[in-house]
Image (cartoon, helix red, strand yellow):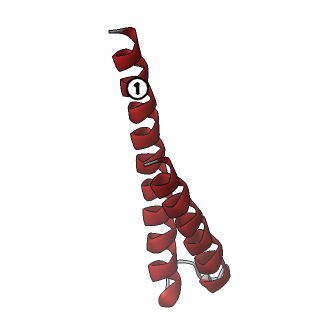
Amino acid sequence: MKIFTILFTIIAFGLIVFNITLVDWKAPLEGDSVVALITIFAALCAIVLLQILRLSKRVEKQQNARK
């Protein structure tokens, strides 16, 4: 599971970097820039969800060790 979350986090960071290059900073809410901004936001959400999953698995592992 740890490798899964790390791999998809790296992919999400790659998507963020790629889409930052696609944003037209003079008009960020027009044309393809909107799609790039939505994709950046979605990738950030994915990173947050993956980190929550990773943290919950760590807590679950610690709780099982105490029992």
Q: Check the picture and name the quadrant holding the C terminus.
A: top left
| Vertical side of 7 occupied by 23: above or below | below
The reply, left or right, for residue 21 in relation to residue 39 is right
**Res 53 quadrant in image:** top left
In this view, the residue in front, 57 or 17, is 57
Q: Is residue 46 above or below residue 2?
A: below
Q: Residue at x 44, y 71 (%)?
A: 38
For mark 1, give the secondary structure: helix
Would you place residue 61 above or below residue 35 in this image? Answer: above
Using a 10 Å C-alpha cutoff, classify the residue at mark 1 as few (fewer than 14 neighbours), some (14 to 19) or many (20 or more). Answer: few
Q: Is residue 43 above or below residue 2?
A: below
Residue at the spot x=53%, y=62% of the render?
Answer: 7
Q: How far across and down, in percent of the image, does residue 1 sit? A: 42, 49
What's the residue type where badge 1 is placed?
Lys
The residue shown at (46%, 57%) is 4
Q: Nearer the viewer, residue 17 or 54?
A: 54
What is the quadrant of residue 57 in the picture? top left
Badge count: 1
Q: Which residue is mark 1?
A: 61
Image x and y of residue 16, in percent: 59, 70
Q: Position of residue 29 (x, y in %)?
A: 50, 78
| Foreground residue among 25 and 55 | 55
Q: Residue furthest bottom?
A: 31
Among the 4 quarters of the image, the one containing residue 65: top left
Left or right, residue 10 beside residue 37 = right
Of residue 37 and residue 45, the one placed in the foreground of this image is 45
Q: Position of residue 59 (x, y in %)?
A: 42, 24
